[in-house]
């Protein structure tokens, strides 16, 4: 399905990123795994290698431009092309506006919005040169639906959705496809610090989102999925 495609996946050490890396590798892609913790990335890479796939680990802080530049430089040195970028990295920090710390706000915005800009910016020169490529931004239903105590997260995801739409218009004529994937509640470590949460059994699993991302990546080159929303089946977002 993705035979010999080179896919850079951020936030690849766990959750949706890990599941996406495994799904892409099983579909034949050469995956480049980016996240801050090398040990966790190595664990994912080892799973891929055990299954006969190809994975390359590049520890990266996607909020730092020098790290992101290094990520794409190393990818091109190793694989000579970038076919797909999956912007999946992001953190959540939650609290009411009156109590929210400025540093927390900045961290959420940078990890969920600035990272999408930086990774797209540094992936694009190679894609533009080849007149081919795909950027898939993994966002959240929070880009569209307000949740209390989630101002920074909702703002970051809404901003990333707007960014996705603008970027799509900028590069559509260069045969570069840009898609937003907006999942509802997913059972990941994001919920670890939240005391009140929906029933985990009613949430999406990371594998559900990974299969959606794979579906987007596998679409014919002469069409674009601008946006796809994925929600749990039983009454929660």
Image (tube, rainbow, N blue to C red):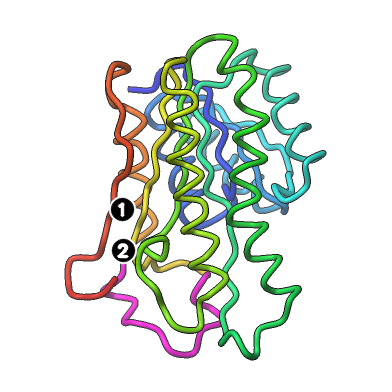
Q: Residue at x 50, y 77 (%)?
A: 150
Mark 1 residue crowding within 10 angstroms, few (<14) / some (14–19) / many (20+): some
- The residue wearing badge 1 is 208
Name, please, the residue furthest toward the left.
234
Locate residue 14, reporting x and y percent: 54, 56
- The residue wearing badge 2 is 204
So how many labels did they put on this image?
A: 2
Instruction: Out of 169 and 227, give the one closest to the viewer.
Output: 169
Name, please, the residue furthest toward the right.
66
> In this picture, is 14 found above or below 82?
below
As helix, strand or loop, the secondary structure at mark 1 comes to: helix
Mark 2 residue crowding within 10 angstroms, few (<14) / some (14–19) / many (20+): many
Instruction: Out of 8 and 25, give the one closest to the viewer.
Output: 8
Q: Quadrant of residue 200?
A: bottom left
Locate residue 65, reporting x and y percent: 78, 41
Q: Residue at x 37, y 41 (%)?
A: 213
Q: Which residues are magenta?
A: 190-203
Locate residue 154, reporting x and y percent: 48, 67
Q: Quadrant of the N terminus?
A: top left
As helix, strand or loop, the secondary structure at mark 2 comes to: loop
């Amino acid at each position: 399905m993705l035979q010999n495609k080179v896919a850079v996946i951020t936030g690849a050490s766990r959750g949706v990123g890990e599941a996406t890396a495994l799904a892409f590798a099983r579909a034949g892609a050469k995956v480049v795994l980016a996240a801050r913790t090398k040990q966790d990335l190595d664990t994912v890479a080892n799973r891929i290698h055990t299954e006969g796939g190809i994975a390359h680990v590049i520890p990266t802080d996607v909020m730092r431009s020098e790290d992101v530049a290094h990520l794409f430089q190393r990818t091109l040195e190793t694989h000579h092309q970038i076919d797909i970028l999956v912007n999946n990295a992001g953190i959540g920090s939650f609290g009411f506006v009156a109590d929210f710390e400025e540093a927390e706000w900045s961290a959420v915005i940078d990890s969920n919005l600035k990272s999408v800009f930086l990774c797209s910016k540094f992936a694009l020169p190679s894609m533009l040169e080849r007149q081919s490529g795909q950027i898939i931004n993994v966002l959240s239903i929070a880009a569209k639906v307000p949740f209390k105590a989630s101002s920074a997260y909702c703002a970051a995801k809404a901003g990333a959705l707007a960014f996705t739409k603008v970027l799509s218009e900028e590069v559509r004529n260069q045969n570069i496809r840009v898609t937003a994937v907006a999942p509802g509640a997913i059972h990941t470590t994001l919920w670890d610090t939240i005391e009140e949460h929906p029933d985990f059994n009613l949430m999406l699993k990371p594998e559900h989102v990974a299969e959606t991302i794979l579906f987007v990546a596998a679409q014919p080159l002469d069409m674009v999925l601008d946006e796809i929303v994925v929600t749990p089946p039983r009454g929660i977002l």
